[in-house]
Image: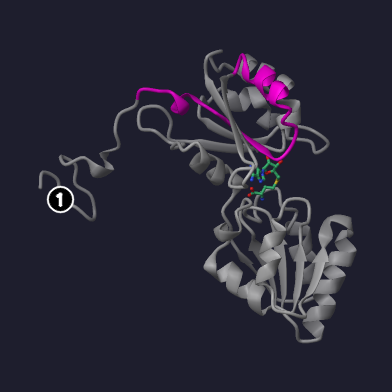
């Protein structure tokens, strides 16, 4: 069996219990070397065959998986954060399906939630926004025209922007063009949950200069939205006048 496992954002304790157990008992591990914390590999049993996928092609990666499965061995494919976001797992799963090799996905703590925890701040506030947009700025990978930064900005929701900190100057111009007010808060979290994590606070108009000054060019999450400063209506979830499935109001 092949397991695509979310390694979490960096802190090795942020892998799931299920992911950690699979790491400890699989005979082959292929990890995404650029972002996965190598400390996680200390969970592998002695003798585990370990590959860093950073310098491998898709065919080499899936070749190892297929061969291992046919030899009766389990494989963990360790991806950063949660594998379903910008993980390039679809093409791996499609090749495995074609080869009739069984696989499963074990989710992980994505970097956008690790960034929210680092601040720490809630991403959805009643009366401010109830929507979170996960996206990236167009770079070497195209983004469909219907999802331009400006058109997404029109919603004034909370945005979590991956893979884009090196383009923050152009990105913030598009956010402004799309309708966010200039004083909308932006928080950039570099290496959330790692020991050298850094958090830079600013607004759409000054965050680019702050990020350049801090020399942040990779592995950072850009969080944008009024929630990071707004007055909000406290949630009804714990309001004593509000009833829900687990609690009667006014008690
Ligand atoms: N699947 C991953 C995302 C992979 S794309 C996830 O769910 O998090 C890589 C991008 O994720 C980086 O460019 C950066 O924007 C973000 N990222 C990954 N780890 C991060 C971390 N510890 N702190 C902040 N951003 C991170």
Q: Of residues 169 and 100, which is closer to you in this image?
A: 169
What is the x, y in percent for residue 73?
A: 75, 83
Going 73% across and 51% down the picture, which residue do you hit? 35
What is the x, y in percent for residue 101?
A: 75, 76
What is the x, y in percent for residue 15?
A: 58, 61
Count numbered badges in the picture.
1
Q: Is residue 152 above or below residue 90?
A: above
The answer as to whether callout 1 falls within 8 Å of ligand 1 is no
Going 46% across and 36% down the picture, which residue do you hit? 123
Q: Where does the N terminus fall, quadrant-wise?
A: bottom right
> Regarding ligand 1, which quadrant of the image does it lie in?
top right
Q: Residue furthest front?
A: 195
Q: Is residue 67 above or below residue 19?
A: below
The residue stretch that appears in magenta = 204-231
- Locate residue 188 relative to residue 77 in the image: left or right: left
Q: Of residues 41 and 76, which is closer to you in this image?
A: 41
Q: In the rendered image, which quarter is residue 72 located in?
A: bottom right
Q: Is residue 19 above or below residue 128?
A: below
Going 35% across and 22% down the picture, which residue do you hit? 231
Q: In the rendered image, which quarter is residue 11 located in?
A: bottom right
- Locate residue 224 relative to residue 251 in the image: left or right: right
Q: Was residue 223 drawn as part of the magenta stretch in this picture?
A: yes
Q: Which residue lies furthest to the left in this view?
A: 251
Q: In this view, does 103 lie above or below 237?
A: below
Residue that carries the numbered disc 1 in the rendered image: 248
What is the x, y in percent for residue 215?
A: 74, 27
């Amino acid at each position: 069996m092949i397991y695509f496992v979310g390694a979490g954002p960096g802190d090795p304790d942020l892998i799931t219990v299920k992911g950690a157990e699979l790491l400890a008992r699989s005979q082959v591990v292929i990890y995404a070397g650029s972002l996965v914390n190598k400390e996680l590999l200390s969970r592998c049993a002695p003798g585990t065959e370990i590959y860093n996928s950073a310098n491998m092609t898709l065919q080499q990666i899936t070749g190892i998986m297929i061969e291992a499965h046919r030899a009766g061995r389990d494989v963990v494919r360790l991806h950063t954060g949660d594998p379903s976001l910008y993980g390039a797992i679809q093409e791996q799963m499609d090749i495995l399906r074609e080869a009739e090799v069984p696989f499963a996905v074990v989710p992980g703590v994505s970097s956008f939630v690790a960034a929210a925890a680092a601040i720490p701040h809630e991403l959805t506030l009643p009366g401010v926004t109830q929507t979170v947009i996960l996206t990236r700025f167009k770079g070497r990978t195209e983004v469909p025209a219907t999802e331009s930064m400006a058109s997404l900005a029109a919603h004034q929701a909370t945005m979590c922007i991956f893979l884009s900190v090196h383009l923050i100057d152009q990105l913030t111009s598009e956010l402004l063009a799309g309708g966010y007010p200039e004083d909308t808060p932006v928080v950039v979290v570099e290496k959330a949950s790692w020991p050298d994590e850094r958090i830079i606070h600013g607004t759409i108009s000054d965050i680019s200069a702050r990020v350049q000054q801090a020399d942040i060019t990779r592995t950072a999450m850009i969080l944008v939205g009024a929630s990071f400063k707004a007055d909000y209506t406290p949630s009804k979830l714990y309001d004593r006048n509000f009833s829900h499935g687990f609690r009667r109001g006014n008690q």
